[in-house]
Amino acid sequence: MVELWSVPDDELYNLTEDPLVAAFCERWNGEQENTSFFDDYQEHRLTRLDSLFESVKVSGRLSFQSELNPWWWFREYDGIRINFGPEGQMVHVDGGRHRLAAAVCLGLEFIPAMPGIVHVNSLELYRRYKVNKKSG
């Protein structure tokens, strides 16, 4: 049988090491120095992203995609997508990087996301979690 999830735990993607997340955290935490990373962005784009960050900061949460656009009522279309590894590790795949950067910088506990690939072992962990939650 082919192992579909073969990334060792110590090699899983760490969000705080993502260059985009790190750059936005620096900007939003007032630590940004002149970097070539932002030289390529147009100022109106940064203004929109700053507005997104302030909105999340004030509300204390990320909005669901359906709250932002009624046409996106199904799951988290065009939002943050997360895969689940064999031990239940969450791995950001794609989509919603700016929203995810804001959530990481603000330390939000919950974020709306669309599940992608789920390792079969994660399903068993989830079942046990549900049983323990009901009995506990």
Image (tube, rainbow, N blue to C red):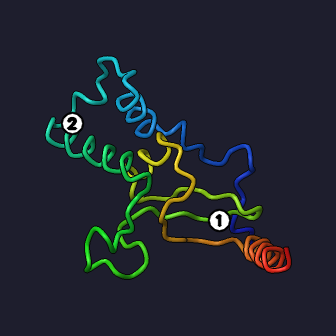
Q: Quadrant of residue 40?
A: top left
User: Tags 2 and 1 in contact by the CB under 8 Å rule?
Assistant: no
**Residue sitting at x 74%, y 50%:** 8
Left or right: 22, with 82 as reference point:
left
Q: Residue 17 placed where, x, y %?
A: 54, 36
Left or right: 135, with 12 as reference point:
right
**Residue sitting at x 38%, y 45%:** 57
**SS at mark 2 in the image:** loop
Give the crowd class for mark 2: few <14, some 14-19, many >=20 residues within 10 Å.
few
Q: Quadrant location of the C terminus?
A: bottom right
Q: Amino acid at mark 2?
A: Tyr
Say above or below: 118 vs 9: below
Q: Quadrant location of the N terminus?
A: bottom right
Give the crowd class for mark 1: few <14, some 14-19, many >=20 residues within 10 Å.
many
Looking at the image, the residue that sits furthest to the top is 33
Q: Mark 2 = which residue? A: 41
**Residue sitting at x 39%, y 68%:** 64
Q: Residue 132 placed where, x, y %?
A: 84, 74
Query: Label 2 vs label 1: CA separation?
Result: 32 Å
Left or right: 3, with 135 as reference point:
left
Say above or below: 65 vs 131: above
Q: Residue 120 placed where, x, y %?
A: 74, 76
**SS at mark 1 in the image:** strand
Q: Amino acid at mark 1?
A: Phe
Q: Quadrant of residue 7?
A: bottom right
Q: Residue 80 placed where, x, y %?
A: 44, 61
Left or right: 127, with 89 as reference point:
right
Q: Mark 1 = which residue? A: 84
In the image shown, does 136 or 85 lie closer to the viewer? Answer: 136
Q: Quadrant of residue 3?
A: bottom right
Mark 2 or mark 1: which comes first in sequence?
2
In the image shown, does 114 or 85 lie closer to the viewer? Answer: 114
